Amino acid sequence: MAGRGGLLMLENFIGGKFLPCSSYLDSYDPSTGEVYCRVPNSGKEEVDAAVEAARAAFPGWSSRSPQERSQVLQRLADLLEQSLEELAQAESKDQGKTVTLARTMDIPRAVQNFRFFASSILHHTSECTQMDHLGCLHYTVRAPAGIAALISPWNLPLYLLTWKIAPAIAAGNTVIAKPSELTSVTAWMMCRLLEKAAVPPGVVNIVFGTGPRVGEALVSHPEVPLISFTGSQPTAERITQLSAPHCKKLSLELGGKNPAIIFEDANLAECIPTTVRSSFANQGEICLCTSRIFVQKSIYSEFLKRFVEATRMWKVGIPSDPSADMGALISKAHLEKVRSYIKKARMEGAQILCGEGVDKLNLPPRNQGGYFMLPTVITDVKDESCCMKEEIFGPVTCVVPFDSEEEVIQRANNVKYGLAATVWSGNVGRVHRVAKKLQSGLVWTNCWLIRELNLPFGGMKSSGVGREGAKDSYEFFTEVKTITVKH
């Protein structure tokens, strides 16, 4: 709906109805730096109303058969697919990513999330064992846990929100979702499709606002037994503290400092374009992006020359430009944070080979106030540098040489994170050896970001707790019960 000054005004979606809020937050178009939307600044009152709606909807929804719930999810997937172009345009404007990326990755994946879990819910089986000598039969059943709190980030807004909503409601839970206050539009647009998809009122509730107000009220609510969160480690620590008195079930996906290890026998014709993409896709604002590139010394100079050339070809442009590879970063504050790492690298004596402060960024006059930045390559940086240790979450990557396999494994593992890694080598034995030794929840070899949704997704160490995927998400969003029958 339109509000004052023609700004888009969002409303919370609670119990199947759009409800206004008493106060609102400004939301900015990252490509211009201008306010274009107002988002509800919700708090405890709205969370309490959403819990009431979710609790009322739970008995009816959880008692439906998996087949019935599957049909609802399939209808919702159809409706999202029919709105693909409208959603892609909105996601691009709200987040700063290119329309091309939203059209080819974000929205299709949101559709696939509902289709995937609509199918997988039909194929889960339970265990049964016999103890004939005691005349007993044991079996397990899985029941939905209740109301799920789903907190999703700003980098892949609808993609990651639906990755949580789909398995949660497929398993029979009702949900209260809190998208990022920076990127709320596509979640609000999806709410407009829920009634058409025959999602009963109260099954999906979306409360917009900030972490300190909505998030804290939601994760500390005694009637919300499980929380799925994707975001930063400090926020995850706060969620853990607030939820601890209630012994809630947590799934936490917290980002990474992902290495690419490039051995001298790597196929550079494939490796270089893929590593440019893995470093800078979505402005580097993907938790799986490569931010540390270890290259074997014998090919280091050749790799660096070709990698910098390829990076300079990566076009930064307005999100609607079909030839742009990269759009704007999410916010002014985030752009300043990313730039601060490049300043620190310079102060430490590192070399900036291309990008920020080295090359000129050309933008139309209307976009001069937008949050754009060129993809940036840093070398001569020590492993102890904050640029090699901390998640920057922007279009910045560090390239460093290594000698031996043992050395690079130790260096790649020498950070607090452990989400994803890539290994480039033509030696199949080495690929398996290195993949096994890397402290990482996902390892891609000679490729990047090829996902099989059946398989577990998640990280080690400070990259999070828990896994998501067909089996893992189902287990997280349900409680198992063992029943023994003596006959």
Image (cartoon, helix red, strand yellow):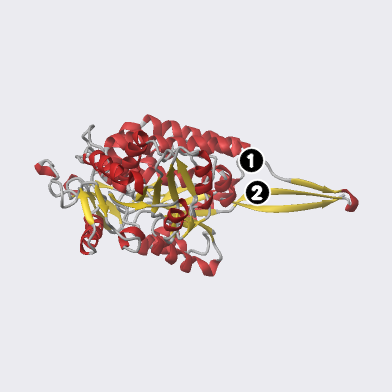
Left or right of 106: which side holds 341? left
Residue 188 visible in the displayed image: no
Label 1: few (<14), some (14–19) or many (≥20) C-alpha neighbours in 10 Å: few
Q: Which element is circle 1 on?
A: loop
| Residue 156 placement: quadrant | top left
Please give the count of numbered marks on the rendered protein: 2
Residue at the front extreme, as displayed: 298
Residue at the right extreme, as displayed: 133
Identified at 54% across, 33% down, the residue is: 71
Q: For the residue marked with disc 1, what is the amino acid? A: His
Do the residues under discs 2 and 1 have CB atoms within 8 angstroms? yes
Residue sitting nearer the eye, 47 or 132? 132
Residue sitting nearer the eye, 146 or 447? 447
Residue 388 visible in the displayed image: yes
Label 2: few (<14), some (14–19) or many (≥20) C-alpha neighbours in 10 Å: some
Q: Quick one: label 2 or label 1, which is nearer the N terminus?
A: 1
Indicate the quadrant containing the N terminus: top left, top right, bottom left or bottom right: top left
Q: Please determine whether, in this image, residue 131 is positioned above or below residue 189.
A: below
Residue 233 x %, y %: 41, 61
Residue beneath disc 1: 124
Q: For the residue marked with disc 2, what is the amino acid? A: Arg
Left or right of 216: which side holds 308? left
Residue 270 x %, y %: 36, 34
Residue 191 x %, y %: 39, 42
Q: Nearer the viewer, mark 2 or mark 1?
A: 1
Residue beneath disc 2: 142
Q: CA distance from mark 2 to mark 1?
A: 10 Å
Q: Please determine whether, in this image, residue 398 is positioned above or below residue 281.
A: below
